[in-house]
Amino acid sequence: MLVTNRRNMFFYYKKEKEIEHKLQALFSLARQNGFSIVEDAKDATIIISVGGDGAFLQAVRKTGFREDCLYTGITQAEESGLYCDFNMDNFDEMLHSMVHEEMEVRRFPVINVLVNGETSFECLNEVSVRSTIIKSIVIDVHIDDMHFETFRGDGLIIATPTGSTGYNKSTNGAVIDPIIPCFQVSELASINNNRYRTLGSSFVLSQDRQLSLKIIQDGNDYPIIGLDNEAYSIRNIQNIAVTLSNKVVKTVKLKNNSYWDRVKRTFL
């Protein structure tokens, strides 16, 4: 089932001569194995990013977090990535695996981010909220309808399970198994004193919870919101609501290459 109805490939990559030259050989291999190369991502059933994790995140975002296609990533020789199972040197192995159905489909959770009750975004990795001025940001943190804490510091990171190995991990957040439908909140340089008191550690919320962040308007009216690997400056941010989306991103992996295999290979 993996390949019989999935034959249209779209490649997402930087339009650089060196990469385009290398890709010509991959395009030929794909066509020889019965795949078509399409110019528009809307016509694709398989979307392939070329590059590391950053390129994969961009490919998913730029093509609209599609649920009706499969995503996969290939890296160049010097790159590695937790989202990418293949590199340009073993592209033929990837095609062989697809043709002979030696792959598995995995489903990665996505978080939904609603800004000021108006503008909605999706994230595969994480959303971060940070001060844009040399001043700590103050945020009232609510879990569902309960006021949980008032945070003061550099900002907050809300990560998906797959995003837990990125920015979140660098702040001593936990690495979460992506089969668990949840999201994690981690602090950036929180201030704890007689006036401000936070949990002081990361915490994990289930798929049924809503996290609400109210930005205290004290000069940090224009914080930077990082959505995966893109930064957005949105005027007059007052509140941000984060929930686990019903949407998932479907990717393909080799049967002997689990998420924890790649975590071990990357970090240990």
Image: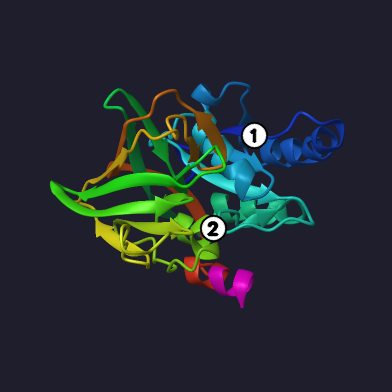
Secondary structure found at label 1: strand
Looking at the picture, does residue 128 appear above or below residue 204?
A: above
Looking at the picture, does residue 18 appear above or below residue 102?
A: above
| Residue pointed to by mark 1 | 11
User: Magenta: predominant secondary structure element?
Assistant: helix
Q: Is residue 120 visible?
A: yes
Q: Name the residue: 44% across, 66% down.
A: 173
In percent of width and height, residue 118 lies at: 30, 22
| Residue pointed to by mark 2 | 166
Front tag of 2 and 1: 2
Q: Quadrant of the C terminus?
A: bottom right
In percent of width and height, residue 29 lies at: 73, 42
Q: Is residue 7 visible?
A: no
- Residue 31 is tagged as none
In percent of width and height, residue 16 lies at: 81, 31
In the image, is 122 to the left or to the right of 239?
Answer: right
What residue range appears in magenta?
Answer: 263-268
Q: Name the residue: 26% across, 27% down.
A: 117
* Amino acid on which disc 1 is placed: Phe
* Amino acid on which disc 2 is placed: Gly
Label 1: few (<14), some (14–19) or many (≥20) C-alpha neighbours in 10 Å: many
Please name whichever residue, 255 or 268, is drawn nearer the observer in this view of the structure.
268
Q: Is residue 264 magenta?
A: yes
Secondary structure found at label 2: loop
Looking at the picture, does residue 24 appear above or below residue 110?
A: above
Give the mark, 2 or 1, whose residue is nearer the N terminus: 1
Spatial separation of the CA atoms under disc 2 and disc 1: 24 Å
Q: Name the residue: 57% across, 59% down.
A: 82
